Image: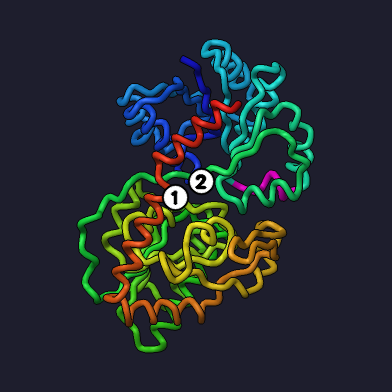
Amino acid sequence: MRRVLHCLSTVDIGGVETKVLESLIHFATKGSRYEHFLCAFRGGRLEDTMVSALREAGGHCEILGRRSRFDLAFMRSLRQAAERIQPDIIHAYNPGASLWTRVLLGGRLDWRPLVHCGGIRAASEFKWRMLERALLGRTAGFVFNSEATRSIWKRRLPIRCPCKTIYNGVSGSSQSSVDPPPPSPFVLLTVCRMTPIKSIETQFRALAILRDQGQTDVRLIVVGDGPTRAGLEREVDNLGLRDAVRFEGFQSKPEEYHARAHVYLCTSYNETFSQTLAKAMGDKMVCIAGCVGGPSEIIEDGVSGFLLPCTEPVPPSLKRIVPGSVYDAVAKAFRPPLGVDPVVLAAKIAEIRNRYDELGPMRLAAQKRISDRFSLDQYCNAIQAFYDEL
């Protein structure tokens, strides 16, 4: 049986890490025509949950304990792991994992790694783009998690090796028979890592607008953690929303919150896919997202969710953090990064609340959209087919 070595920078919480571990657990439990090995450079909070589940299912996982950027012991351990496993394909995720696998392992013709592009940092930032140009000769192929990601990479780099867009897959609905929560309070939900690009402040401002309009029973649950959490909590206090916003922190099973909320929100300046949005749709939530990147490919506006126009300029303090351009799949065009207008978001939330009982067909359409186009089975079948091609 041919072997695949999957390389991750870490097994800490994140969309990429969750996707990889879910797919490897799927292969371990349902079978695969390849033998899969996971090599994580560092440990993290998923060790006690998803990594343990992978090992219990018979999957292979090795954590190298990388201590610093140029940890010589880590470099030696990665080479030794590859020599021991003798993979037919090396599948690297994250910019760091794809960099080190190609630098340390890509010198052999039969070990040119396959790079999985779940973000646009390496194609957007000058220093990363120069590194990518230098490493193209050590790259067997590229997998992109959306057409938005693929468009930006191919616009910035002269990629000539095999490329494939394979959408991230999500597991089946966990609450197909669960009724929606009571009409009051009307609960909004967002699940994400708290970073500036997520623009969670937009949701707070929309909530403040709704309160000023008399909708005082609207609540927002924020699941996740990250570097901007303290600042976001201060913003909630400044807006007088402490009783309306609940920060739940990191949760190993955030999908359990889907049954507690009416509407899922995604207001990022850019998302290359959005695993959490797809999971919320798979659990029949009414979803609102900005019309950008992955969400503009996942949601059919007005059918399986709502896409809002992005019109708000990025604050000057964030211009060095967000990418210089993003892709709108509806317009099929590149544009500068822009945010969702809180006024427009508040109006859409109010509209959904007024006609929530009529949106049963949309909730079913969202679930069907995910099962038809973005299921874990489809992802696993497509990635194995690409391995076959390589």
Residue shown at the point (63%, 68%) measured from the top left: 338
Quarter assignment of residue 102: top right
What residue did someone put label 1 on? 373
Residue 221: quadrant of the picture:
bottom left
Q: Which residue is mark 2?
A: 167
Q: Residue furthest bottom?
A: 213
Foreground of the two, 100 or 227 = 100
Pointer 1 local density, CA inside 10 Å: few below 14, some 14–19, many at least 20: some
Residue 117 higher or lower than 149, as above or below = above
Q: Which residues are magenta?
A: 119-125
x 44%, y 35%: residue: 380
Label 2 SS: loop
Compare marks 1 and 2 and give the one earlier in the sequence: 2
Residue 343: image x %, image y %? 51, 81
Residue 280 image position (x, y, % from top left) = 37, 57
Question: What's the CA distance linking mark 1 and mark 2?
Answer: 8 Å
